[in-house]
Amino acid sequence: MDRQAVSTIKGYQYQFLKSIYEVLKASENEEVILEGALEDIDIISGNSTKFIQCKYHEALKFSISSIISPVLELICDYLQCLVIGKDKTFILYAHFQNEDYDVKKEDILNYINTTKSRDILINFFHKLYQIPDNNILELANKVKKTYKEKEDLYQYYATMMEPWDG
């Protein structure tokens, strides 16, 4: 069995153990849904829902860049729920080869405000910031983008961020 398959299996085991943990600690009023509608584990209790995402990266050392995509996905989901008035909680469990790291809000904000990552900017910028140009917003919301469209978005976002650079 190759290393990637072993790592994938360990990832499923990690998610399974987190799932068992959530099932065992759930109260009578909570419904735990594994492989939920939005995340790996959904816990419904009355009018509130908790969404849990599990990531397993045995071969990686922790860095903000290694969790930023799932964190930004959770933030975007949270913002959508906020707009429609739903009471939601989002949790990310992540395992890395090095010691535990306590991620602070400032770490995430600093990364978002200083990143030059094309993928992060193209996939999330329009979900986190107000885009005054309707043509750019329409382009950003397209599911499939050409290379040129992605480059146009990146250039637009980079220009918008220039006042905050160094």
Image (cartoon, grey):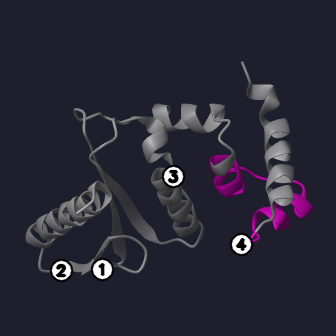
Q: Give the residue number, with chain letter if any, for mark 3.
A: 69
Answer with left or right where residue 36 lies relative to residue 153: left
Disc 2 is placed on an element classified as loop
Q: Which of marks 1 and 2 is nearer the N terminus?
A: 2
Which residue is painted at 14% across and 73% down in the image?
23
Q: Give the residue number, with chain letter if any, for mark 2.
A: 29
Marks 3 and 4, how far apart in space? 17 Å
Task: Check disc 1 and give the amino acid type.
Answer: Gly
> Label 3: how many residues lie within 10 Å, few (<14), some (14-19) or many (20+)?
some
What span is in magenta?
Answer: 120-144
User: For this rendering, which residue is in front, 97 or 137?
Assistant: 97
Task: Check disc 2 and give the amino acid type.
Answer: Asn
Disc 4 is placed on an element classified as loop
User: For this rendering, which residue is in front, 87 or 37?
Assistant: 37
Measured as percent of width and height from the top left, residue 54 is found at: 31, 60
Measured as percent of width and height from the top left, residue 149 is found at: 84, 59
Task: Check disc 3 and give the amino acid type.
Answer: Ser
Q: Give the residue number, with chain letter if any, for mark 1.
A: 46
> Label 1: how many residues lie within 10 Å, few (<14), some (14-19) or many (20+)?
few
Residue 73, relative to residue 120: is it above or below? below
Marks 3 and 1, how far apart in space? 29 Å
Disc 1 is placed on an element classified as loop
From the image, state whether disc 2 or disc 4 is nearer to you. Answer: 4
The answer to whether residue 47 is seen in the rendering is yes
Residue 1: which disc?
Answer: none
Q: Give the residue number, with chain letter if any, for mark 4.
A: 143
> Label 4: how many residues lie within 10 Å, few (<14), some (14-19) or many (20+)?
few
Q: Which of marks 3 and 1 is nearer the N terminus?
A: 1
Answer with left or right where residue 34 lies relative to residue 166: left
Task: Check disc 4 and give the amino acid type.
Answer: Val
Residue 163, relative to residue 11: is it above or below? above
